[in-house]
Image (cartoon, rainbow, N blue to C red):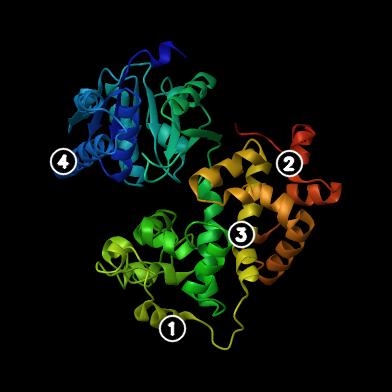
Amino acid sequence: LKKSLENETVAVVGAGLMGSGICMVLLKAGFKVHLVDVYEESLKKGVAFLKGTIQSYVKRGRMTEAQAKKMVQSLKPTRRLENLSSCSLVVEAVIEDMKIKKNIFGSLDKIVPPGCIVLSNTSTLDIDEMASAVGPSRRPLFAGWHFFSPAHVMKLVEIVLGKATSLETTCVLQQLTKRIGKIGVVVGNCDGFVGNRLLISYGAETTLLLEEGVASVPSVDRAFLKFGIALGPFQMADLAGLDIGYNVRKERGWVSVGGVPGKKKPPRYPELADVIVSEYKRLGQKSGKGWYDYDKNVGKGRKPLPSKEVDSLIRKYAKGGQRSFSEQEIIERVLFPLVNEGFKCLEEGIANKPSDIDVVYLYGYGWPVYRGGPMWWADNEVGLKYLLQQLEQFSSQFPQTEYFVPSELLRKCVTLNLTVEEYYNLGLSKKSNGMQSKL
């Protein structure tokens, strides 16, 4: 491990919001960091963000002028990948486009030294497909290092293992993640890994409630704020940018283009979430309008205000004459499939233990600490028997929706009258032939 981290020269490819945030984290940890971006303007913006943030730390007394000066001297902006020939670690943090990422990795493989660890900050894309762009000898050194936005603030990092990722690389990443002051959770490779995989049903069901005419944007957000989540689903979407989710759905082949349905579009699909971006150009806070309106003169442009345009758009999709859902019904429809997907991650070996999923949601998604995380909540507040009963009801109501189909692990826990935590503490997961760990 010591040998792996002896060389303090590292690199981040991509000077956007995520890349600059990761660069800041590495600079604070004492690394000399090459920040790479082929676009001059993007590189300048990234460097300006870093220098501005460093100065803000000095003003707030979080570091001395001498420390700030050293950090700025350790930042090496460049437009050339060729300058990375002496790096011990490179993190890719460009747009979520598989082709672009593979081109970058193919080039890096020829430039960086043989022992250099190569990582992707992708939030959803296949780590193994990216690893195919590098030679066989590099693949054991290839993994995902998924930071959460903004990277220099959020504590969580998912360490995503591919088929070929070595145990040594995993250990180095665990140690490095700790060194940079983050909480690392080792997860397996699948669409969305752990955090964003569970979020697929969350994003879909919140919008489908609008289309079914049983809830409104404010009523959904109110239910989640009362539950204890720091921002409601629509408030959070506006903050992150509606185009982010739209581009991920497009990459998955879900979005309709020119009236032609997406090739891989799920049977129940919230078209409303795509239309609000593609036709209405409502991108969230950054464009002054998303699920809510924003006014620069009200709350510094961050306060969500009801939108007549959004209300009118929802009415075009919503079924009339429906009974409005209670807050409990909203929470159950949205969070029960999320928990169910957590059980499936355990079942498939994508997550090692229930508490790993809880840590991901506590530190990466603003889950209320007093509710312990989704799996703890299911065990201790909901009750697995009730969870299973409700999922069976949802699955009967929406038979084509995969995330409502109850997990076999959930069924086992209910049959044995055990919480999922007890199931793992008793070592039953290791005795179950059907649960093959991918970690």
* Residue at 27% over, 44% down: 16
Report helix, strand or loop for mark 4: helix
Give the class, few, some or many, for how many residues have Cα within 10 Å of label 4's Cα (few <14, many ≥20).
Answer: some
| Separation (CA) of disc 2 from disc 4 | 49 Å
Q: What label sits on residue 421 in the rendered view?
A: 2
Q: Earlier in the sequence, mark 3 or mark 1?
A: 1
Mark 1, mark 4: which one is toward the viewer?
4
Please report contact status of discs 3 and 1: CB closer than 8 Å, yes or no.
no
Q: Which amino acid type is marked by label 2?
A: Glu
Q: What label sits on residue 258 in the rendered view?
A: none
Give whichever of 344, 328 is nearer the camera. 328
Question: Relative to residue 424, is residue 156 drawn left or right?
Answer: left
Q: Which amino acid type is marked by label 4?
A: Lys
Q: What label sits on residue 335 in the rendered view?
A: 3
Quarter occupied by residue 301: bottom left
Give the class, few, some or many, for how many residues have Cα within 10 Å of label 2's Cα (few <14, many ≥20).
Answer: some
* Residue at 35% over, 68% down: 290
Report helix, strand or loop for mark 1: helix
Q: What label sits on residue 316 in the rendered view?
A: 1
Q: Earlier in the sequence, mark 1 or mark 4?
A: 4
Q: What label sits on residue 44 in the rendered view?
A: 4
